[in-house]
Amino acid sequence: MNTADLGRRVGVPSTALFTDQYELTMVQAALKAGTADRHSVFEAFTRRLPEGRRYGVVAGTGRVLDAVENFHFDDEMIGFLRQQEIVDEPTLEWLADYRFSGDIWGYPEGEVYFPGSPILRVEGSFAECVLLETVILSILNHDSAIAAAASRMSAAAGGRRLIEMGARRTHELSAVASARAAYVGGFDATSDLAAGFRWAIPTVGTSAHAFTLLHDTERDAFRAQVDSLGRGTTLLVDTYDVTEAVRAAVEIAGPELGAVRIDSGDLLLVAHRVRQQLDELGATGTKIVVTSDLDEYAIASLAAAPVDAYGVGTQLVTGSGHPTCSMVYKLVARAGSAEPDAPLVPVAKKSLGAKSSVGGRKWAARRTDEHGVAEAEVIGTGPVPDELAGRQLLVELVRGGEVVAREPLDAVRERHVAARAGLPMSAIQLSRGEPVIPTEYA
């Protein structure tokens, strides 16, 4: 297994200031009160899925592991906190020595989840666990939202190739994370070179309308691209007249032309006309790629079109209308004292309305029917029923502060395909509905 398979982690900066101020002030107060070292259990979960979504997708776990591993306060950071008088000197001394030394369990990346699923469980002292809240939620909420949108688009594409191309529609660092999450959710490639470098995701790209407009004629542009990139390149054919462009493309590249890209117009109609024209010109092997602000609904509407690949940007990197998963990170159990053998006490928020939570360290299992299809997400705090013992979902990710579960991104991607295939068929319907299986508490 080479380094690229796991993502390039060399030179990753500290993540310690990717947090909210109140995480540090809580540590200060807990240190002063003598409660900072109480053994604590935090869980990340969501109380509900985004409206209309039938399942969620766990994505970003690998990035969470990197963030935890690189969560430390260097001298410059400590100086900033001191200058801004964020916390007092005893707390600064504690932060200067901070390294997470606890345990983390979670759903394996690529797995699906439902309301209440304990997607991530973080255990250690209160102080060391509470500091990780913001960075963990930041990663999981973003990446899982993108992966869920990607999964829906992948289902709608029905096996056709999907290309992530949203880098110019979001923050430059979000673009890299989005490409990774999209790959987990079923996309095949990205246009973003930073994502290719960082995560070894296949990259693609040829030319934009600007390249055609640069040249005196469209033929000149096509000839220049074919001369440079070869006959297998993809030519953009909708800068002027599509029919003339397709004719010129085949005349210049021959029937070996790799693909043509359509970026505007009635994609269903234009794709049919282009396919007919390509076949008549002998370019029967030339693929058709469509772009133009696609989402899962537009992709589904093109199911009958002779399209070979879709390029998706804005709607993908914004979660197709749901840019976050509303995950929270809550204390669910803590020891009654800082003694090593102090028993855990379940704790839970008892707010009015929908913000209450369920206390206790949880296990989760997915019950299936006689055909192996999921029928319920079962969550409990006591003994695991014998019939669910082999269906447990949480796996060990960090032990004693050391990451123990890094894996290649392709393995994560394959896991998601299998997890989605294990859900009832209605999971991939694009019509609005409730979670495809219920959450039950044992």
Image (cartoon, helix red, strand yellow):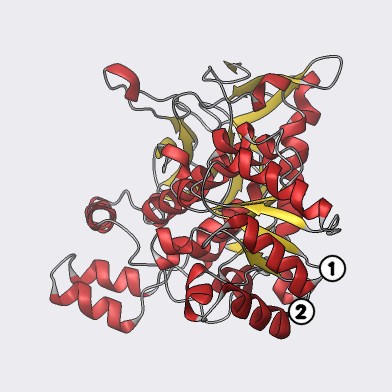
Query: Which residue is depicted at the point 64% across and 70% down?
Result: 7
Q: Where residue 78 sits in the image (x, y, percent)?
A: 27, 77
Quadrant of image for the N terminus? bottom right
Q: Nearer the viewer, residue 278 or 263?
A: 278
Q: Where residue 39 sits in the image (x, y, percent)?
A: 45, 46
Q: Which of the 4 image quarters holds residue 173?
A: bottom left
Q: Amino acid at mark 1?
A: Glu
Q: Nearer the viewer, residue 380 or 171?
A: 171
Q: Does residue 180 appear in the picture of this structure?
A: yes
The residue pinned by badge 1 equals 256
Query: Which residue is depicted at the point 51% across and 27% down?
Result: 116
**Reading the chain from its start, which is encountered first: label 1 or label 2?**
2
Q: Is residue 356 above or below residue 63?
A: above
The residue pinned by badge 2 equals 230
Q: Nearer the viewer, residue 204 or 1?
A: 204
Query: Which residue is depicted at the point 68% across and 60% down?
Result: 246
Q: Amino acid at mark 2?
A: Gly
